[in-house]
Amino acid sequence: MAISVGDKLPETTFLIFGENGPEAVELAPKLKGRKVVIFGLPGAFTRTCDATHLPSFIRTRAGFAEKGVDEVICVSVNDPFVMAAWGESSGATEAGITMLGDPSAEFTKAIGLDFSVPAIGLLDRCQRFALLAEDGVVKVLNLEEEGGACKLTVGEELLEKI
């Protein structure tokens, strides 16, 4: 069952590329007592994710800060090396977006938003979503209704609802 408003986000571990290589990042401490935006997408460097979804959060990062959001996190079922490269090449890292890899889809499956399209090489990927969590509880959730679309989950849509 997919996550919904009012649900507590699961305790999980992501990977980030740190100073000494891949490092584990526990989600719970990032959420405790904080307002955090998390958006998930099918894959780094994929067409819609790279051209539309990630750039929308780069554009709106300052707006989220003005509304008291402590951190904006991008999640994808990719390894931390790819997420770091994507963050650097896209400008997301410079914009202050935390790029977290969910390589085994642990978080994606725990929130019920995994999907696969083997014909195009997408296995256990993350459906497109954007949410606001306060102290780990989902307060606002936007889920994309049609595959391949990125309308409801862009930064501007979430920012309007906060």
Image (cartoon, rainbow, N blue to C red):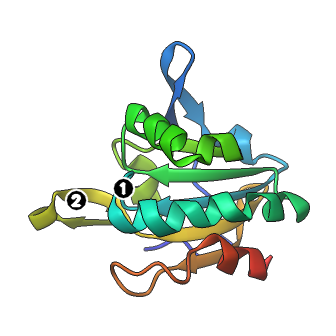
- Tell which circle, 1 or 2, labels the residue nearer the N-terminal end: 1
- Disc 1/disc 2 C-alpha distance (Å): 8 Å
Circle 2 is placed at which residue position? Answer: 122
Kindly indicate whether the residue at mark 2 contacts the one at mark 1 (C-beta within 8 angstroms).
yes
Determine whether 124 is above or below 155 in the image: above
**Foreground residue among 151 and 77:** 151
Where residue 109 appears, as percent x and y from the top left, is 39, 58
Which mark is drawn over residue 22? none
Image location of residue 141, percent across then percent down: 63, 76
Name the residue type under label 2: Leu
Report if residue 46 is visible in the image: yes
Q: Is residue 145 left or right of residue 123?
A: right
Q: x and y percent of residue 160 in the render? A: 76, 81
Q: Position of residue 147 (x, y in %)?
A: 33, 81
Which residue is situated farthest in the left direction here? 119
In the depicted view, which residue is nearer to us: 16 or 133?
Answer: 16
The residue lying toward the viewer, choosing from 114 and 40, is 40
Q: What residue appears at the point 40 percent right and 48 percent down from the top-left corner?
A: 106
Q: Which three-letter amino acid code belongs to the residue tagged 1?
A: Gly
Residue at image location 39% in from the left, 51% down from the top: 44
* Residue in the picture at 60% in, 47% down: 92
